[in-house]
Image (tube, helix red, strand yellow):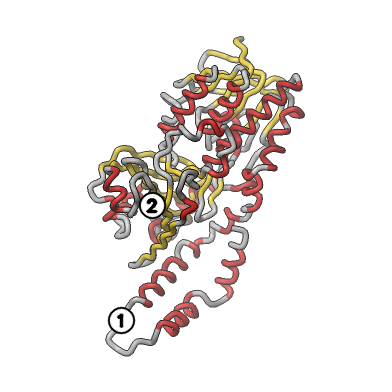
Amino acid sequence: MEQVECIVVGGGLAGLAAAYGLASAGVEVMVLERGDYCGAKNVTGGRLYLEPVRRFYPELWDEAPLERPVTRERLTVAGDGAHLTLEVGAERFGGARPHSATVVRARLDQWLAEKVAEKGGVVVPGMRVDALLREGGRVVGIRAGGDEIGAGVVVVAEGVLRLLAAEAGLAAAPQARDHAVGFKEVLELPAGAIEERFGLEPGEGAAHLFMGSVTRGLPGGGFLYTNHDTVALGVVVGMEALRGRSDGLEAWQLLEEVRQQPFLRPLLEGATLAEYSAHAIAEGGISQVPALYGDGYLLAGDTAGLSLNALLTVRGMDFALASGYFAAEAVKRARAAGAFTAANLACYEAMLRESFVLRDLEAMRDAPRALGNGRLFRHYPDAVTRLAAQLYTVGEGPSPGLVRTLWRGLRRDFAGLDTLRDLWSLRHI
């Protein structure tokens, strides 16, 4: 059986970040990607938070194919017949070191795969791994079709469904209650039209999140990210909540409805559909993170459940890059120690716990439960937009005044124990 020092299963950001670090250190590494090319199956909606990951491979960031730095943040709360949009702009968002940027994963992942190859790593696209090979509880390689390839260590970065990891007993099979489903369109728009419609300077970008009636009250929300000459538009809803509906609603129908929302329709006028995709998203939080290492293996990225929905920020790509970097560091240390045992690889989890990845997941431990509260997506969007519309309405009779209108609305929709309970449940988000 052919032997490789390290096999990386999956050519996403986690797997490629691990492979880049290993190849840079002279470790023999092979990346196996089932897609036609790295990024072919990565359909993330498009924003990478840069500040947490700049220290990982700093030589790459000046040339990484980022789309637009996000200098405008928008949040729309949509209710019954009304909506309220908040826009935030800050100097810290842009400049020479932008806070975040939009990305097209097909472009970013292909570029990173090329960097791995330049360092001496082998990237094999179109290779589906069918099983992880185990001997006496140790992972010793992979099986792909009729071929078996042995490895001193395997970095499993196969993605959110973690079919191989579950089959090999390295992680539990994913459950609907811990996942959401996202539908996304990529719509072509000229760069000038994007900048004009979103009030951007040339080269700048915007991120727009929306929640409430756009998901018909289901836990979830929508997003729009501006790329160079396209926009990524999508909607994400909890799998369990969607499956529990009795009206036969399909998630793709929500995306059709989102495109026609009055706060989006003018921004998308004349846009041409270029791509349509769907993907599962891990939202179980740290309670669903499995054991991250063992004899002969490490789990990284979505396979390890490393993603976080904190309502205003949705993170996964920065977690993936960080986990790949730390996986490479752990493999290098175990190699120097002479064996890829669980004891020698345990530093991987220790490094993640010292980093923002597991610290942020731990700090947001209660987020999945809190964000499953349907009142956040039904009652409050209706209440907020109704009150905002009343504040701007002038009727036939005498006006009750700004403060009195505000007070009546707050007493009507925000007083009582339910609101206090909801606020308490959100205290760690």
Report the mark closest to the observer, 2 or 1: 1
Q: Residue at x 56, y 26 (%)?
A: 20
Quarter of the rendering containing residue 168: top right
Per the rendering, the mark at residue 248 is 2
Q: CA distance from mark 2 to mark 1?
A: 40 Å
From the top left corner, tell me how far across and down residue 105 is, in percent: 43, 35
From the top left corner, tell me how far across and down residue 260 is, in percent: 29, 55
Q: Residue at x 61, y 36 (%)?
A: 323
Q: Is residue 412 left or right of residue 254?
A: right
102 or 150: nearer the viewer:
102
From the top left corner, tell me how far across and down residue 171 is, in percent: 63, 35
Q: Is residue 366 visible?
A: yes
Where's the C terminus, which quadrant? bottom right
Q: On the image, numbered disc 1 is attached to which residue?
A: 394
Q: Which amino acid does the dot numbered 1 rest on?
A: Val
Q: Is residue 110 left or right of residue 168?
A: left
Q: Residue at x 46, y 56 (%)?
A: 90
